[in-house]
Amino acid sequence: MLVKCMKMETAEHFGVLVKSAKYGLKLTREKYAVINTRATLPKFEKLQKIGAYADSSGKFYTEEWCREYQKLILENYDLSMRYFKSLDREEFNSSINTFLKKYKGFKEVTDLNEWGCPGYYMMVLDEYKQVYIGTADNIKRRMQQHWAKRISFDRMLFPMYAVTKSVLSIDAFRAFDTTRIYAQKKRRTYVLEDEYIQNMPMKFICNRIGGGQIKDRIDVMNALALTRDARDMSSMLNN
């Protein structure tokens, strides 16, 4: 059921209420790379040299830099859409089925109200042939956070300027883009997250980094190693 009120859409999705806010309930190009001049990343010397910052503290970007960066973000968006279309749907579904047969503890979720518990989850975005695998102390709450959260403008490319390699963040997608959810109840979180991610073909994964808890620099490097070169869309540039 979908209700529209003063440009705000509310709907029930997997048993919980979701709201569109200003970004809608499905991902669109028009609402994707909305400029925000506030910096959420540390101040970078390279950006300072090219005059990206509007202030000496590096808390805000200039409008000019944001407009140029927006072009790169949208180029990455367009490449990603071409990439998604190139993927084989039968192989995608087969990969999910193989995963579920191997990890039988994962169950299909129809009502998130039954999943206010710790464990692991897989969000399936059928239109894009992508999945996101995560872990949480409260699966229901974490799912709602994904749908309500908006990836920051300066974090839309990861790493920055990586137009042909950056993976669209799960938090760039909207609630209705999640068409299936599978979850597994487990008291101990994070332990198996990396294993689960590695047991799905990387071309179908929209995790930007590997799984597990990030406690120190070594953990960061290990998490980045899994996905650093997982996607290269340079071949899509001329398509």
Image: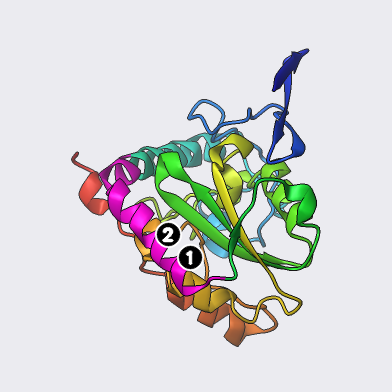
Badge 2 density bin: few <14, some 14–19, many ≥20, Cα 10 Å: some
Q: Mark 2 points at which residue?
A: 96
Look at label 1 and name its amino acid: Leu
Q: Looking at the rendering, in which quadrant would you find the C terminus? A: top left
- Which x, y percent locates residue 141? 78, 53
Between 1 and 68, the one lying in front of the other is 1
Which quadrant of the structure image shows residue 128? top left
- Which x, y percent locates residue 125? 49, 45
Residue 223 — which label? Answer: none
152 to 64, vertically: above or below: below
Outermost residue on the bottom side: it is 218
- Pointer 2 with pointer 1, Cβ within 8 A: yes
Q: Mark 1 points at which residue?
A: 100
Where does the magenta region start and end? 82-104
Between 30 and 44, the one lying in front of the other is 30
What residue is shown at x 54% (from left), y 41% (from top)? 179
| SS under mark 2 | helix
Marks 2 and 1, how far apart in space? Answer: 6 Å
Look at label 2 and name its amino acid: Ile
What residue is shown at x 45% (from left), y 54% (from top)? 167
Q: Looking at the rendering, in which quadrant would you find the N terminus? A: top right
User: Is residue 106 found inside the magenta-colored segment of the image?
Assistant: no
Can residue 78 be spotted in the picture? yes
187 to 175, vertically: above or below: below
Q: Is residue 192 left or right of residue 13?
A: left
Q: Main secondary structure of the magenta part?
A: helix
Badge 1 density bin: few <14, some 14–19, many ≥20, Cα 10 Å: some
Q: Is residue 169 left or right of residue 229?
A: right
